[in-house]
Image (cartoon, rainbow, N blue to C red):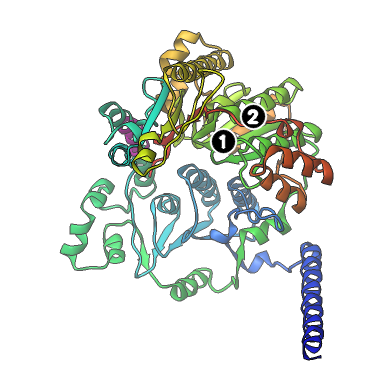
Amino acid sequence: MFTNLLDKIDFVRKIFINTLFIIFLLIFFLLLIITPFMSKTVNTQDSILLLDASTQMQESSPLSGSIGLSNFQIVETIELATKDDDISLILMDTSLMNLSATDAIEIGEALNNFKSKGKKVISYGDFYFQNQYLLASYSDEIILNPFGLVYLEGYKNYRFYLKEALNKIDVNINTFIAGDYKSAAEIFTNSSMSEDSKKESERFLTSLWEKWKFVVSNNRNTKLSINIQNYIDDIGNLISNSNKKGSNLATDFGLVDSIMNRSDMEEYIFSITNNKKEYFLNFYEYIQVNEPAASENKLALIDAKGEIIDGDFYDNELSSGHFSRLINRVKNGDYRGLLIRLNTPGGSGFASEIIRQEIIELKDSGIPVIISMADIATSGGYWISADANEIWASDFSLTGSIGVWTALPDFNEGLKNIGINYDGVSTTDFNPSLINGPDDNTKLLIQNVVNSAYEFFLEIVAEGRNMDKSFAKKIAEGKIWSSEEAKDLNLIDEIGSQRESLNRLAELSNLKEYSVELIEDDISIFDQIGYYFADFLPKSIENKIFSTVNLSVPSYLLTKNEAPFPVNMICLECLIN
């Protein structure tokens, strides 16, 4: 009887908890539905426009999708504010802003146009890291928190080298490379960076650093009282000898203009407007009420960043399945051209080829395609770029690294040392294994595949860029090029901003005016969950699930097979600090 009473109490408890949970879900989904229709009153006349980390595009989620503005949308917002008589001041709080050098200079050039209309830009930061300071240098005035610091490092390329550690655990890594300067596999075979790799890295890193110093010195030319290189190289001694905080030292050297905490900064900002402004208006809120009417002439923009990977990961714009869906949206939409904003060190050779074929198919349908390179578009990133109508890069872009490599481990000796043996029989003499490592026959096969992929890479570059294959090979070999070098070598067409490349795309599309639409994936939460788990399930189970729930998965994903070994087109040395 007592047991029956407990069972009834437990049943009522479960009913109560589940009811509350269902009510919570209903409220949650109701809020998701009505939130976009809840308008907020925005008074631009009494507002100071605010650009901060909350403005930027945040990590997408299955429920909310992408939140915030892409870098192009931030630039577009500044362009709108430049024409808006109600907006006379932009405050940038660069604290926590995630910026590449290319992001910074493109926003900065838009700010220069804003200032040319007699308007003002002020930056505030708790700390200024390198690209945050690059952006802040475009301001009329830079303010630093009293406990802050202008923290600059320059560009560097350091990696862990694993050879000695692998030797201690008796693991051997077999590497297969095509491209004399393709140095990614050195982390397995060397104890330190090779002299050739050091020389190459110093060449392109120095090019980037000289550009960075030139932009900042030019922007702060009447205020800087110290050479930036000297400031970085001797910052410890400078602070120690001065007996000052880093913020005071930054002010003395003209790196910043003043020191204020947040409350003092806000009071100062309002005072310079004669207290005519009463609010800080976020960029995202501003563009919601000031976005211009869309033109009938639409250009599509795909913001593609990250490592190029096989499969269909929703949160990676450069997974082959996800990117293919974005291209299909462009094909099936009313778009006159496509700009691909590319920021990738490369990745999977197979995924790169799938993406390249999608771009070719789109071009063949009569839609022009321009690649706009951000900081990095190397190796597999160049593979997918070569057949575009035109390739544009920024001043801070790195490209090239045309080469192929792969690596296979041999765990046999290491396993034997701990008493694990690997043995068996086979019907053939061909027995590739990650345990025993490749034999001579397998090594010949893998090196042949790598070499063939490299030759195909050279053919893609030669045909796409209209150059002799012999010249393509000369400038390939895994070498990394700055944007100026790449233009001289005909690897790119122009150096310019994303806006300039869009204007050129409009010319190719015969448009006098246009609007830009950011292409994002539009799939349900259930599809997203299905795509995510598809890459982890055995193929037989995956096919059964997809056929049962009728998800719209591309056919090639349902028939894919895992490659026996990866064909890597990734530039690890491009992932600079």
Residue occupying image coordinates x 67% and y 24%: 357
Q: Quadrant of the N terminus?
A: bottom right
Assign a secondary structure to mark 2.
helix
Q: In the rendered image of this protein, does residue 246 appear above or below residue 505? A: below
> Is 532 left or right of 564, judged from the image as shown?
right
* Residue 394 location (% of width, % of height): 49, 35
Q: Nearer the viewer, residue 103 or 311?
A: 311
The residue under label 1 is 308
> Is 483 left or right of 563, judged from the image as shown?
left
Residue occupying image coordinates x 54% and y 18%: 428
The picture quadrant where one finds residue 437 is top left
In the image as oriented, which residue stretches furthest toward the bottom? 2
Residue 226 is labelled as none
Amino acid type for the residue under numbered disc 2: Ile
Q: In the rendered image of this protein, does residue 496 appear above or below residue 32? A: above
Q: Is residue 551 visible?
A: yes
The picture quadrant where one finds residue 192 is top left
Q: Is residue 203 magenta?
A: yes
In the image as oriented, which residue stretches furthest toward the left? 241
Asked if marks 2 and 1 touch (Cβ < 8 Å), the reply is yes
* Residue 230 location (% of width, % of height): 22, 48
Amino acid type for the residue under numbered disc 1: Ile
Q: For the magenta stretch, what is the residue range?
A: 201-210
Q: Nearer the viewer, residue 286 or 220?
A: 286
The residue under label 2 is 355
